[in-house]
Amino acid sequence: MARKHKRNIVPFGPQHPVLPEPIHLDLVLDDEKVVGVIPSVGFIHRGLEGLVDKRDFKEMVYVAERTCGICSFQHGMGYCEAVEQIMNIEVPPRAKYLRTIWGETSRLHSHLLWLGLMADAFGFESLFYQCWRIREKILDLIELSTGGRVIFSVNQIGGVLKDMDAEMLKHFLDVLAEVETEVHEIQKTFMLDYTVQSRTVGVGVMTKRQIHACGSVGPFARASGFKVDMRKLGYEAYPDLDFEPVISNDGDCYARCDVRIREIFQSIDLIRQAAAKIPDSELAAKVKGNPDGECFARIEQPRGEAIYYVRGTGKKFVNRMRIRTPTFANLPGLCEMLKNADYADVPLMILTIDPCISCTER
Amino acid sequence: MAHFFTFAKTALKNLTSKPVTTKYPDAPIDYPARSRGHIEIDIDQCISCSLCVRNCPTECLAVDKNAGTWTINRFDCIVCGYCTVNCPKHCLKVVNGYQKPGTEKQAATYQKSPEVMAAEKAKKEALAKKKAEALKKAQAAKAAKAAQAAEAKKEGD
């Protein structure tokens, strides 16, 4: 007699050790295999987009950058980009370079944070602390240059509020050289260690076709050979910098880890290039009038492509602001990836999309 | 190829190196100059224009022009520094030192000194007097002009 399989639903989250933020997944299990996933979000919805009725378009920069605590700078920058395009404001070149440097610094701290969480997910606590120790140096750089460790608050419509002198830029490069050496050291553990490889190689494989069908973005897509990077669209100072999107073709958790580690080195290289080329100019262009029109701005956040839609009607308050965050785009891919996965691998696989739920729910 | 003991070098280095953490609060923190700790006001420079109040994203500020006070709810303030950007007299600034935690939200009120208040009052009174005088003068001129016009009209008739 054939064995009857009974399907069970196991709730995963919203509180789970592997999740830094709350998302709930109902995992449909057939024995130890996941056969279906039903996600539900909405635990930390704050209604930030609705604040456009109460905060004028200049104050909204501070609201936009509080969408998320990790890619806060890039949220503010994306909103500024959209408003600047509506108002045809030409951002001074130095402000563009400074935004690029801060944007890449925030990518560095986000990826190092993720590497630590990844190490924690497969139970390697000392590696987790090593990653966060290195990240602390990046946070110190951020505090030195902007005054905040998490929220930068240096963006404004038309440019930036703070400058970096040559001495500060040199200090940046010195610290980044140390960070590079230290990341090279921990890279060996992530990439070569037998125990780590047994948890990551061949786990959660996504093909290029699946990634395309699910509309996934960022390192999650690039790890499956999908060459998509919004920085190549040429916003801020990226057209002047020489880089190619980091891709891998394996599509498993190992490849996603590999892509993010190589992106750390790429970000360090981009900051070096930007620091070498940074021109002298004023920090912000003058802003006259109110935004009248609509615009989509697309930027590459640490987790992938983020889209900012802003519609203004010539009044002080913009009519609509909408943020499509990378984690939101990666959720269908996550559900696809979890199908036919082992139950024990689920936490690690969820982590490899680098979920940021506070972004997603805004 | 998979390797073993890839973390051994880092682990051994950690055994012999000093801790990276400091014993706060015994060891003091060295804040960078730009650290956004809290907002400070040079209240005697303030002209009570309320631009900071109008531009605060969290609405944590209040200005009373007549009483000469500036109030900040430090538990609501997000230290974005937008008020300092908008202050025409540059009397607001972001300085080091984070707000200490508390059990309830408390507002801090800053009062202008009596000398500044007296000087402002005197200035206001002088301005009002000047205005009143100017108004009186203008009215007198207007009346004189009207009388002249009426006389001219009479002569013409």
Image (tube, helix red, strand yellow):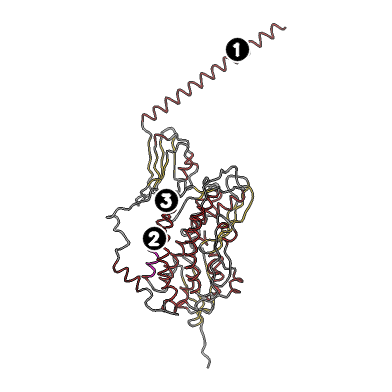
- State left or right for residue A115 relative to residue A228: left
User: Is residue A130 on the magenta stretch?
Assistant: yes
Cα separation between marks 1 and 2: 79 Å
Residue that badge 1 annotates? B144
Where is A107 relative to A146, above or below? below
Cα separation between marks 1 and 3: 71 Å
Residue, x 59% and y 68% (percent of image)? A215
Magenta residues (range): A127-137
Q: Position of residue B46 (x, y in %)?
A: 43, 35
User: Considering the numbered disc 1 on the image, is that residue within a helix, a strand or a loop?
Assistant: helix
Q: Position of residue B139 (x, y in %)?
A: 57, 17
Residue that badge 2 annotates? A136
Q: Amino acid at mark 1?
A: Ala
Q: Residues within 10 Å of mark 2 (few under 14, many from 20)?
A: some
> Tag on residue A134?
none
User: Considering the numbered disc 3 on the image, is that residue within a helix, a strand or a loop?
Assistant: helix
User: Is residue B48 on the magenta stretch?
Assistant: no
- Chain hosting mark 2: A
Residue that badge 3 annotates? A167
